[in-house]
Each structure stands twice: as C-alpha cells, then as structure tokens.
Image: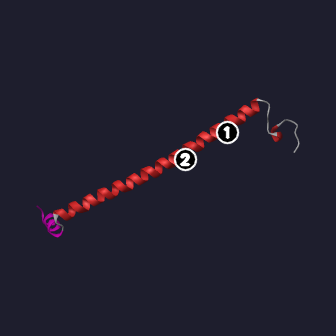
Amino acid sequence: MTSSTAQFNQAHPAPAVATAFAAGVLLGWLIAGKMKTGLSARGARWQRKVTEAKAHRRAISRWEGEGGAIPSSQKGSRR
C-alpha cells in the first residue's frame, strides 16, 4: 500500500466507508425513484395535452366539413 492509502485507511475504517457508501446508494435510489415518478407524471400530462389538441383539431375539421365555419373566416363576411 502507498502511504496515502495507508493514511486514508487509518483515518477512515472500512466499516465507516462501507456504511457511507451504502447510505449514498440508498439515498440515490430513493431520489431516482421520486425523479422517475415526477418525470412519468409530467410525460402523462404532456401526452394528454397532445391528445386533447388533436381531438380539438379533428372536431373543428369535422364541423367545418359539415358546413360550419367561423364567421370571420367566411368569404365576404363583416365583423
């Protein structure tokens, strides 16, 4: 062992290093779970918005196809 490794081992016993590492892994796992939940909820909201926008465009297109139109977009209309 080099002198720096020996000094580290003397200052930080193996059980303390192992405990700190395990605590870091556990904390990282908990944070990652919360992040994943937040990201999936955000993705679901975004997907719902996209779906609603598509449905809205289809409804307008269907309505215009049936002869309905927004008055301001009809030819020769006045406001």
The picture quadrant where one finds residue 21 is: bottom left
At label 1, counting other C-alpha atoms closer than 10 Å, the crowd grade (few under 14, some 14-19, many 20 or more) is: few
Quarter of the image that includes the N terminus: bottom left
Q: Secondary structure at mark 2?
A: helix
**What residue is shown at x 29% (from left), y 56% (from top)?**
25
Residue closer to the observer: 55 or 74: 55
Q: Which residues are magenta?
A: 1-11
- What is the magenta segment's predominant secondary structure? helix
Residue at the image position 31 percent from the left and 56 percent from the top: 26
For marks 2 and 1 on the same chain, the one whose residue lies earlier in the sequence? 2
Q: Residue at x 55, y 47 (%)?
A: 45
Taking 40 as reference, is 61 above or below it? above
Q: Where is residue 34 drawn, in percent x and y?
A: 42, 54
Q: Is residue 30 left or right of residue 73?
A: left
Residue 61 horizontal side relative to residue 43, left or right: right
Q: CA distance from mark 2 to mark 1?
A: 16 Å
Please state which amino acid type lies under the numbered disc 2.
Arg
- Residue 7 relative to residue 51: left or right: left
Residue 50's x, y, as percent?
Answer: 59, 41
Q: Is residue 6 magenta?
A: yes
Q: Residue at x 76, y 33 (%)?
A: 64
Kind of element beneath mark 1: helix
Image: 3 above or below 60: below
Q: Which mark is residue 45?
A: 2
Please tell me the numbered disc located at residue 79: none
The residue sitting at the left extreme is: 1
Residue at mark 1: 56
